[in-house]
Image (tube, helix red, strand yellow):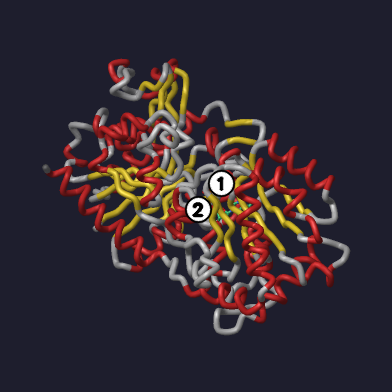
């Protein structure tokens, strides 16, 4: 199958969150299966700096409003293609800074989406499927149904839109319609208009042949008012075309038996290295009482710091959660107001909280391996990779029962000693603390804890199953398009 994955981020090139893991791993897995796959990304500053790219000899001119923007394509390892347009992408961040989004994001991703289609034409690559991801590529299916509608070249190209997080929709002022390259007739409630603004994700939802989200539970949740962020109505009209496929994790990147970032390696057969990782992590991020806290539960958080991730519950739960010497290691980057609140919490509990604000792969690996429990009290969580990575490293998740967290964690049953983590339902710090208390009881019983660690490490979260499911929905999209 000829597959083109269009994404605004992908591991190992550029990453702000789970989308990058998914795009990068799925690309690898599909190639291993023997498909002809291309991965297309914008050429950000960090990619230019870190990768040795080859010229493709293909360049383009795209009209965006009154301007014509020029770009060219660069290639890495034959099948990863980057669209260069320094005016738009040669920046330190992908979408914006903690102070807010870049104010030309509409232009950046109009350009990117049209470039992907122009690339296919110029390179003579006819994809059977274009796999679009989130709002940044939502315009691709829309353009195929509008500007490129009568292009014979794309007659046999179907589209899939994966919604990784419906909370991010790409909303822009109506005046940006002049930049889109289509007429005002599309600016209506059945089209791409959304409460007076343009919605790029909606453009993808109304136009893609198939839509999926990253877990079965989230695929159901987004059809409801509480989780649909205003798009539940339009999604319900396309319900037959919506699927849920849980993400996998990259087993080469996330493997405690081979992880060179760790001070000691380990596997479910011999978990002794995990205690070494805990000890070294405590030494690294706390300066005092190292030996004492080795015996206590160590908690960890790695993630984007947005309101979605439930940091308000962590802050409210802190006094009780951190009593009796329990420690918490946080690594994250995100909204400025959450940075501020966490800094305040750290000041207040300086002996018990280590806070690193920033993006740090190495520290992330060391936290997944070194802590006993991984906290994900998310308000909502489309799939969540953190809990799966944590489990792969023998770290037990304590999480809210929402979205993909429900599909990947079995709540611990103290009567049968079964389960793979600790879930709570109500979005409150009381419910969160109850789950933490149950987790600490299990921790105090070393036999039960050992059992739990080895159980979570044996779960298969590899990409293989999910990649096969993607092939099935690609085929379905192609069939639906033909009808
Ligand atoms: P989301 O996609 O909502 O950001 P996920 O749990 O699906 O959350 O994926 C987050 C991914 O990004 C994980 O691989 C996690 O390890 C990584 N990550 C998030 N924040 C950081 C950070 N500050 N430093 C290093 N890795 C991070």
Residue on which the image places disc 2: 384
Outermost residue toward the right?
288
User: Which residue does the image show at 51% across and 56% down from the upper left?
Assistant: 385
Depth order, front residue of 146/451: 451
Evaluate whether residue 99 shows in this view. yes
Residue on which the image places disc 1: 378
Give residue 66's position: percent from left, percent from top.
Answer: 42, 18
User: Which residue does the image show at 32% across and 20% down from the upper left?
Assistant: 189
Q: Is residue 452 left or right of residue 264?
A: left
Image quarter of the N terminus: bottom left
Evaluate whether residue 65 shows in this view. no
Say if mark 2 contacts mark 1, CB within 8 Å. Answer: yes
| Nearest-to-viewer mark from 2 and 1 | 1
The answer to whether mark 2 is within 8 Å of ligand 1 is yes
Q: Is residue 128 left or right of residue 257?
A: left
Element assignment for label 1: loop
Give residue 206's position: percent from left, percent from top.
Answer: 29, 32
Label 2 environment density (alpha carbons within 10 Å; few <14, some 14–19, many ≥20): many
Give residue 408's position: percent from left, percent from top.
Answer: 45, 60
- In the rendered view, tell whether residue 344 sits above or below residue 69: below
């Amino acid at each position: 199958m000829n597959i083109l994955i269009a994404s605004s981020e992908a591991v190992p090139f550029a990453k702000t969150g789970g989308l990058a893991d998914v795009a990068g791993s799925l690309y690898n897995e599909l190639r291993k299966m023997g498909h002809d796959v291309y991965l297309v990304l914008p050429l950000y500053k960090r990619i230019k700096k870190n990768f040795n790219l080859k010229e493709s000899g293909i360049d383009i001119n795209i009209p965006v409003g009154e301007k014509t923007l020029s770009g060219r394509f660069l290639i890495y390892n034959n099948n990863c293609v980057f669209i260069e347009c320094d005016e738009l992408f040669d920046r330190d961040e992908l979408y914006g800074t903690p102070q807010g989004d870049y104010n030309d994001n509409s232009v950046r991703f109009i350009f990117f989406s049209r470039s992907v289609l122009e690339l296919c034409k110029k390179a003579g690559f006819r994809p059977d499927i274009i796999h679009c991801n989130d709002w940044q590529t939502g315009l691709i299916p829309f353009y195929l149904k509008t500007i490129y509608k009568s292009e014979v070249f794309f007659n046999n190209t179907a589209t899939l839109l994966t919604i990784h997080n419906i909370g991010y929709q790409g909303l822009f002022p109506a005046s940006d319609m002049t930049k889109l390259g289509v007429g005002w007739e599309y600016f209506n409630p059945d089209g791409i208009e959304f409460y007076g603004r343009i919605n790029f994700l909606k453009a993808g939802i109304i136009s893609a042949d198939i839509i999926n989200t990253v877990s079965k539970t989230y695929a159901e949740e987004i059809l409801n008012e509480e989780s649909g962020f205003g798009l539940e109505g339009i999604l319900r009209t396309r319900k037959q075309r919506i699927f849920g496929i849980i993400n996998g994790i990259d087993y080469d990147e996330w493997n405690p038996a081979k992880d060179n970032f760790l001070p000691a390696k380990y596997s479910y057969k011999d978990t002794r290295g995990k205690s070494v990782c805990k000890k070294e992590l405590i030494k690294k991020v706390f300066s005092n009482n190292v030996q004492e806290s080795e015996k206590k539960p160590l908690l960890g958080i790695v993630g984007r710091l947005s309101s979605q991730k439930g940091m308000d519950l962590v802050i409210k739960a802190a006094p009780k959660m951190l009593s009796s010497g329990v420690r918490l290691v946080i690594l994250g980057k995100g909204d400025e107001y959450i940075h501020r609140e966490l800094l305040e919490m750290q000041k207040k509990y300086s002996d018990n909280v280590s806070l690193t604000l920033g993006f740090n792969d190495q520290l992330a690996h060391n936290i997944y391996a070194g802590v006993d429990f991984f906290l994900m009290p998310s308000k909502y969580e489309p799939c969540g990779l953190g809990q799966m990575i944590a489990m792969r490293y023998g770290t037990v998740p304590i999480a809210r029962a929402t979205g993909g967290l429900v599909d990947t964690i079995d709540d611990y049953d103290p009567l049968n000693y079964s389960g793979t983590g600790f879930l709570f339902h109500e979005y409150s710090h009381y419910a969160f603390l109850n789950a933490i208390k149950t987790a600490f009881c299990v921790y105090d019983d070393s036999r039960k804890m050992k059992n739990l660690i080895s159980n979570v490490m044996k779960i298969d979260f590899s990409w293989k199953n999910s990649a096969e499911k993607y092939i099935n929905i690609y085929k379905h999209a192609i069939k639906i398009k033909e009808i």
